[in-house]
Image: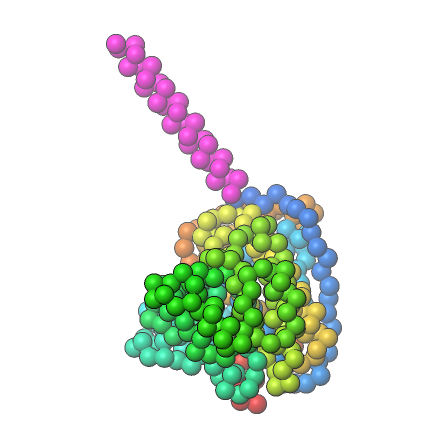
């Protein structure tokens, strides 16, 4: 009996050591990007037709800090499209309620220029509606659009279209789309428009308002004009390696439609899953999402450089993961990452600008200033 007990103890110790080693190896695997295929990066001219932009494209890499950018740069053998931006600054991100913001409060700050509590969508600390840049644009006959790799009802895109006390009111957020005249929105979230507790079928209501409502990105990308609701997934879009070129294709589609408006346009594009990757403390996931976002930046710059009247702003709502790089190789694209948290952090995030008015986005600013400068350039001039 004594020998059996000793054998059991030895076996348990062995299993524990094996489990710890397996867990350690698994964690190490998550923290390493081993390098993959790269893409060529083009340098675009900085010659613009005007000093004041006719169009503004705001690109939000959710959770994207400086380290996330540099990890992507390393993975692509030293270069990203984001290097085209000569006007660079930093934005403070704290919310009205917390030193560390969430995406709802920071999204509302970017969309409306107002600090609010974590979880708030388009309302202030007293839960009163604050007007967002899309509403201002629509009032001034400027075309508008949203593109995201999350559900279109998720916190960041929702902040540009909706007014709700909580980011979790997905069905109410979906219904708020019917209260606007937004021209184009593409992302996931089809179920929030159809499988609803109130029994409404918002897809039918959108169609009655003149929207083409499509779920297949291959059909979505063929639309050249008119109002478009692209709901390409029941909930969120899958990860980059599964969704393919959805984000650059959706962004290009939105631009092609919006550019037909002679009064100009405002478009917000979100790379949502940089944030989710960092929440998972997964370097490979982080890098693949950053590269997908950067390729989308390349598509936007291709349009903006040719157009000459488009301001492109790239920033983040906050940093996620306390991400750091502890090793890497520019020649092989290997990135070894480490994380300080599973949540968000309070550090400033980068702001990049290209096009007429780009110089206004340099230095250290608040995230609310980004909205104010956009409004000044697009609405008030």
Q: Main secondary structure of the magenta part?
A: helix
What residue is rendered at 44% in x and 35% in y? 23
User: Residue extending furthest bottom?
Assistant: 381
- The quadrant of the rendering that contains the N terminus is top left
In the image, residue 366 lies at what x, y percent?
Answer: 46, 74
* Colour approach in the figure: rainbow
- Measured as percent of width and height from the top left, residue 183 is found at 55, 76
Span highlighted in magenta in the image: 1-30
Which residue is outermost to the left?
1
Q: Classify residue 308 as left or right of residue 233.
A: right
Q: If the image is split into quadrants, where does the C terminus sit?
A: bottom right
Residue plotted at (36% across, 76% down): 123
Quarter of the rendering containing residue 210: bottom right
Relative to 18, 55 lies left or right: right
Q: Is residue 376 visible?
A: no
- The foreground one among 369 and 298 is 298
In the rendered image of this protein, does residue 204 appear above or below residue 39? Answer: below
Q: Is residue 6 magenta?
A: yes
Give how far across and how far down residue 85 sits, in percent. 64, 69
């Amino acid at each position: 009996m004594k020998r059996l007990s000793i054998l059991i103890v030895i076996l348990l110790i062995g299993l524990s050591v094996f489990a710890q080693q397996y867990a350690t190896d698994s964690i190490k695997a998550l923290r390493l990007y081993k390098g993959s295929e790269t893409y060529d990066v083009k340098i675009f001219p900085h010659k613009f037709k005007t000093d004041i932009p006719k169009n503004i494209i705001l690109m939000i890499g959710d959770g994207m800090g400086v380290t996330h950018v540099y990890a992507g740069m390393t993975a692509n053998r030293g270069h990203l499209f984001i290097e085209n931006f000569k006007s660079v600054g930093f934005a403070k991100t704290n919310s009205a309620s917390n030193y560390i913001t969430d995406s709802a409060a920071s999204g509302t700050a970017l969309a409306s220029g107002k600090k609010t509590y974590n979880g708030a969508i388009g309302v202030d600390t007293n839960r009163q509606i604050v007007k967002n840049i899309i509403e201002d644009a629509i009032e001034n006959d400027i075309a508008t659009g949203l593109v995201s790799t999350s559900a279109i009802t998720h916190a960041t895109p929702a902040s540009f279209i909706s007014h709700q006390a909580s980011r979790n009111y997905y069905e109410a957020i979906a219904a708020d789309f019917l209260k606007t005249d937004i021209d184009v929105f593409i992302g996931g979230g089809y179920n929030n428009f159809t499988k609803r507790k109130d029994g409404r079928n918002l897809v039918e209501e959108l169609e009655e308002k003149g929207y083409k409502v499509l779920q297949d990105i291959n059909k979505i990308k063929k639309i050249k004009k008119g109002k478009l609701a692209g709901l390409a997934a029941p909930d969120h879009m899958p990860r980059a390696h599964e969704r393919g070129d959805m984000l650059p294709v959706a962004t290009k589609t939105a631009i092609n439609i919006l550019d037909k408006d002679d009064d100009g346009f405002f478009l917000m594009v979100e790379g949502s899953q940089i944030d989710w990757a960092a929440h998972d403390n997964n370097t490979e996931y982080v890098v693949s999402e950053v590269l997908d976002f950067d390729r989308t930046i390349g598509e936007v710059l291709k349009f903006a450089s040719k157009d000459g009247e488009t301001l492109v702003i790239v920033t983040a709502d906050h940093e996620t993961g306390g991400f750091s790089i502890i090793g890497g190789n520019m020649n092989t694209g290997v990135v070894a990452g480490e994380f300080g948290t599973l949540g968000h952090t309070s550090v400033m995030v980068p702001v990049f600008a290209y096009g007429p008015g780009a110089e206004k986005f340099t230095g250290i600013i608040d995230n609310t200033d980004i909205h104010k400068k956009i409004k000044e350039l697009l609405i008030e001039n």
